[in-house]
Image: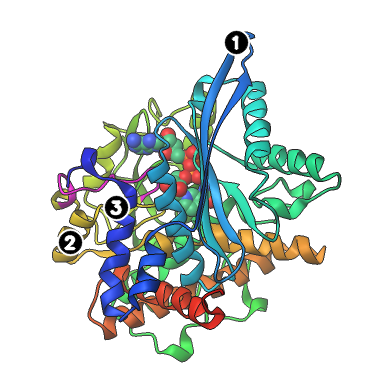
């Protein structure tokens, strides 16, 4: 399957099918999990700044809620399609299950080009879309969060609109909110930080350091944590501070991964965004690059780089760790053979097609699958929701410590099953996740 033919929903179904047999899943449960439980398509008008009325199409898809309320981001992008949202909703179900947080999966999207819209137009679009989907979202039902080209401000508009409909403040309807209206410290960095924790464990594994189950919990005590993360990787040859890293995508997931990894001593040798890529074998200065991107809107033209690349060129560079952090279907059967990284950490959702997966596996590339590598975002979203329900807010250090514990445990649970069953990490992650969801369905029973 080439990139242009790849349908993310078919891929998601295929990934489920691959593990259903291994898990001996009942036929009916398998069938139930192959499709979303509920889908809402909406067409709605928005008044543009010019006075013109434009009609937009959006979706909210709830894949499964056996383990708890549905959870998943909202994406604004010109390529949004119902099948893409279906796939992303299914991946959310597995993601919440693999890190064992009590949520099901959902996703939303609006077909639009946010880059060509003003702030006021985006606000009107968000508020109207919220009204349209308000019939199925809510703090106990389905809780949106930011995704591609949506952010904390978008969440604030959704919360305010939903609260206006209800007549009282409902902060728990979204996560990823600004801090002063109930957002969690550490949420903005959580996807990248969680990804970094999985990379750290993968580097230890790559160094053939076998970690026994009793050590899956990070070794150091909370009191030993300085600043925002724990070191805890003494004694390994492959350490973050020895690693060379290439990153595709320089938004929330990509740029913060770059910042966190480089702060830990990794050499970020190349990054790209939708306009192109920049490279420097000696390592890019990430704080300066972030400043450059915020001034110019792109990484291209950065003075600290000594080479320019196409957006996808970063995927094929020689490096220890490759972090796809842009969109789905970036590593396909057309370029997988050219990937030279030792570890691929999927910060993006669905960046690798199943055909490419096989090629990477045959090349002995260690892949940390999306549902594990980028689960830090939804994990801290869960912390935000818990803090909001309790009206008791944690310190950033507490958030990061809990995140590290969950990510490290999940990584080793997946690694353990993948070693025992002799399967790749993606299959291992699906086996852990699908088993948990199927067990929840069976325990709840089929109504009536
Ligand atoms: P974002 O909008 O902040 O950034 C997206 C980045 O990708 C931008 O820099 C954009 O220029 C770049 N990009 C777009 N098309 C590209 C292309 N063809 N080549 C190279 N770069 C390209 O979005 P984000 O929140 O960072 O999300 C990125 C990925 O991570 C998505 O797959 C998303 O679903 C996933 N993800 C994000 C979170 C989160 O908390 N933000 C959580 C889990 C998963």
Residue 213 at what x, y percent from top left? 43, 89
Dot label at residue 358: 2
Residue 239 vs residue 108: left or right?
left
Tell which of 10 and 295 is nearer to you. 10
Question: Is 329 part of what is drawn in magenta?
Answer: yes
Q: Residues within 10 Å of mark 2 (few under 14, many from 20)?
A: some
Q: CA distance from mark 3 to mark 1?
A: 37 Å
Residue 416 at what x, y percent from top left? 35, 82
Residue 227 at what x, y percent from top left? 63, 63
Q: Quadrant of residue 321?
A: bottom left
Task: Write down the region rendered in magenta.
Answer: 324-336
What secondary structure is found at the residue carrying circle 3? helix
Direction right: furthest residue: 168
Please name the residue shown 54% across and 48% down the image: 73
Does residue 343 appear anywhere in the picture? yes
Tell which of 70 and 96 is nearer to you. 70
* Labels 3, 2: front one: 3
Dot label at residue 10: 3
Q: CA distance from mark 1 to mark 2?
A: 49 Å
First reached walking from the N terminus: tag 3 or tag 1: 3
Q: Quadrant of residue 19?
A: bottom left
Tell which of 443 and 79 is nearer to you. 443
Dot label at residue 209: none
What secondary structure is found at the residue carrying circle 2? helix
Residue 123, placed above or below residue 318: above
């Amino acid at each position: 399957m080439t990139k242009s033919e790849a349908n993310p929903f078919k891929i998601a179904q295929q990934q489920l099918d691959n593990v259903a047999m291994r898990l001996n899943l009942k036929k009916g449960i398998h069938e139930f999990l192959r499709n979303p439980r509920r889908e809402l398509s909406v067409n709605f008008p928005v008044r543009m700044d010019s006075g013109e009325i434009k009609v937009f199409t959006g979706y909210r898809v709830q894949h499964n809620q056996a383990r708890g309320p549905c959870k998943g981001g909202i994406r604004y992008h010109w390529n949004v399609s119902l099948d893409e949202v279906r796939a992303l909703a299914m991946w959310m179900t597995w993601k919440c299950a693999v890190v064992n947080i009590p949520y099901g999966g959902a996703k939303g999207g609006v077909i639009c080009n946010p880059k060509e819209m003003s702030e006021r137009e985006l606000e009107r679009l968000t508020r109207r879309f919220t009204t349209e989907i308000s019939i199925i979202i809510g703090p106990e039902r389905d809780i949106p969060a930011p995704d591609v080209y949506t952010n904390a401000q978008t969440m604030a508009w959704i919360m305010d609109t939903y609260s206006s409909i209800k007549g009282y403040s409902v902060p728990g309807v979204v996560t990823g909110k600004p801090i002063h209206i109930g957002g969690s410290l550490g949420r903005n960095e959580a996807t990248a930080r969680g990804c970094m924790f999985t990379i750290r464990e993968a580097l230890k594994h790559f160094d053939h350091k076998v970690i026994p189950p009793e050590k899956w919990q990070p070794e150091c005590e909370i009191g030993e944590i300085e600043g925002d993360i724990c070191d805890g990787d003494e004694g390994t040859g492959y350490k973050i501070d020895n690693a060379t890293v290439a990153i595709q995508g320089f938004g929330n997931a990509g740029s913060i991964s770059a910042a966190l990894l480089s702060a830990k001593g990794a050499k970020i040798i190349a990054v790209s965004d939708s306009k192109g890529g920049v490279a420097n074998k000696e390592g890019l200065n990430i704080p300066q690059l972030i400043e450059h991107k915020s001034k110019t809107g792109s990484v291209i033209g950065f003075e600290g780089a000594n080479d320019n690349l196409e957006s996808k060129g970063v995927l094929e560079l020689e490096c220890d760790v490759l972090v796809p952090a842009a969109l789905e279907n970036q590593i396909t059967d057309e370029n997988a053979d050219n990937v030279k990284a030792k570890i691929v950490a999927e910060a993006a959702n669905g960046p690798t097609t199943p055909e490419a997966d096989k090629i990477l596996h045959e090349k002995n590339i260690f892949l940390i699958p999306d549902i594990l590598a980028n689960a830090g975002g939804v994990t801290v979203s869960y912390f935000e929701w818990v803090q909001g329900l309790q009206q008791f807010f944690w310190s950033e250090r507490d958030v990061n410590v809990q995140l590290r514990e969950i990510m490290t445990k999940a990584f080793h649970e997946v690694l353990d099953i993948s070693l025992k069953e002799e399967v790749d990490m993606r299959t291992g992650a699906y086996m852990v996740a699908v088993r948990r969801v199927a067990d929840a369905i069976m325990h709840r029973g089929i109504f009536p």
